[in-house]
Amino acid sequence: MRASQFFFNTQKEAPNEAELQSHILMVRAGLIKRLGSGLYSWMPLGLRVLRKVEAIVRDEMNKAGALELLMPAVQPKELWEETGRWAVFGPQMLKIQDRHEREFCFGPTHEEVITDIARKEIRSYKQLPLNFYQIQTKFRDEIRPRFGVMRAREFMMKDAYSFHTDFASLEQTYQTMYQAYSNVFNRLGLKFRAVKADTGAIGGDGSHEFHVLADSGEDGLAYCDTSDFAANVELAEAVMPIQPRAAAQEQMCNVDTPKQTACEDVAKLLNIGIERTVKAIALIVTVDNKAQFVLALLRGDHHLNEVKLAKLAGFADFRFAIEEEIRANLNCPPGFIGPVGVGANVQVIADRTVAAMSDFICGANKPKYHLAGVNFGRDLPEPSVVADIRNVVEGDISPDGKGVLSLCRGVEVGHIFQLRTKYSEAMNATYLDENGQSQVMEMGCYGIGVSRIVGAAIEQGNDEHGIIFPASMAPFSMVICAIGYDKSELVKTTTNKLHDELLTAGVDVLLDDRGERPGVMFAEADLMGIPHRVVIGERGLNEGNVEYKTRSATEAQSLPLVNLVEFLQRVAK
RNA sequence: CGGGGCGUAGCGCAGCCUGGUAGCGUACUUGUCUGGGGGACAAGGGGUCGCAGGUUCAAAUCCUGCCGUUCCGACCA
């Protein structure tokens, strides 16, 4: 490709709302162009990247035995009512009407459509297992689109759905997909991790997320360095403390904390470790339309895990209490609340760690006071519920007992689920088994955020000059910067010839024939993240040399003209 | 939906308080000089100042309403 025949539009400044490096660089390099909130055009340069990712995903899906199809993006409401998700998905779904005022949505996912296909097309156990996939535009009306294509409303997704006669078959395909996903991310050249995950709104049993590791990632991950345990922080279990609760040593007493409302400040004032403090989080839990005031106890330095809490029996519907509710139930302003001496109207639940603490510090339910030397069973009743309700922290024992946990952040780019029969049952997707009996199909589903991968990859690969693409997804694998293309006949003929020969050799090469100044060509090539750069000018040519450098190298090397194509062909592989 | 910010040229911004010819940087066009890390000089083109209403002789500027957008708290590939 010749730069003079292509179109790019690089910018020195990115729009204000771009806050993530990947977003800024994608806009500056001219990969994408914003149309509206969460809506992006993929410009020719960006589309080349997207297509390369797609190609790898498609190839690995095919290798794993999945069959590509393409379903409508627009889906009728009736299908979604069968599974009850028309209501469940709620405002995240873009709902539209046709001229007859019939209701549709722009598909945020395709379980209903594929299950409808399966129930109509699959009759016999002999046809199973089957795995269908598509690569298609999805729309989810995100509450807060941001980070460019990393959290856009319209995005490109590969979604696959498998159908099985039994769970064993599902597990087998699930493993195949797990491996295929690992292959995809390895081929893309990304640092990633597969973690155990919460199944969220899609539902089902077994589930793994695939995360590209990046400090700016929206998900917290916990992993064990000495075993293969890895899980989303939402799910990672904080195991029961090994040490049983120590016997009480101190007497309970008031301590003056005139301004100290946070555990951290109380600990500082008393000159003790924050791990000796307990905080009480006031919640309103609704069961059968009845609101119950609850204090959830956590160690001062721990954080509540709302996903875990919501999974406890009776806690599905909870929210944080507001100040008036706290005052009404405890007769005390927030900042000094605690579990000691509360009335029967207050339920107290404790995190496992707290349940094993003794002689701790907590709020006194009296303004400007905390209590020290507090002990369960003596100063207050044992908590009614003890459960794992906190986020794991660095250094926690790994749930598999084979080491300690470390934390990192990641961008979720893939998610695989064992759906089991959630959709097939609701939509009556059945087949006839060997005995002529009707059986409900087992299902799995497997997603990859194709467009998100581009953002995640840039998040992982960039420097002060711009994007550093992995070779697998760069828009061009090589650029020839022809210095003085418009002035020097020698440069022109040499670079033209090299360009044609590289193309013939199968190298995805860009010839910068615009006659731009060297600085401009270098800056733009770096910004776009092209992995290999060949610089050809008259001065070097007269000595029989050209210059070569990879995107991430700091120094260029001089190469002889002889055998140049062979060399470049080899490095570009 | 709750709360804050911002809407002026493709992008980044000033002007608004104190009403009176719409500006700067960048990008774009043309020319000259340049030519190894977004070069210099000169001359240009490009704006219903988000929309609607109001106050006024006069509104980008003051007032009201609406819309869009963005950031901070409940979603997910």
Image (spheres, grey):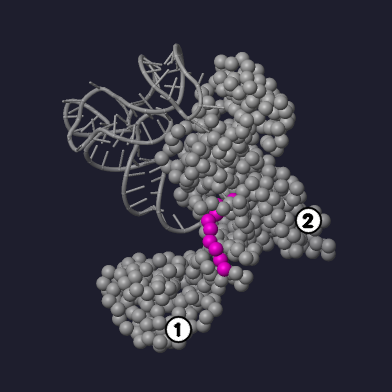
- The magenta span reads A404-413
Q: Which quadrant would residue B52 be assigned to in this image?
A: top left
> Residue at image x 83%, y 62%?
A434
Q: Is residue B23 above or below residue B42?
A: below
Q: Nearer the viewer, residue A402 or A95?
A: A402
Number of numbered callouts drawn: 2
- The reply to whether residue A83 is visible in this rendering is no
Question: Given this view, does label 2 or label 1 mark the residue nearer the observer?
Answer: 1
Q: Secondary structure at mark 2?
A: loop
Q: Which residue is mark 2?
A: A128
**How far from the left and from the top, in percent, is residue A539?**
58, 21
Q: Amino acid at mark 2?
A: Leu
> Residue at image x 41%, y 40%?
A16
> Residue at image x 64%, y 56%?
A416
Mark 2 to mark 1 CA distance (whole Å): 54 Å
Q: Which residue is mark 1?
A: A382
Q: Is residue A244 left or right of residue B48?
A: right
Q: Is residue A34 above or below residue A442?
A: above
Q: Is residue A532 left or right of residue A519?
A: right
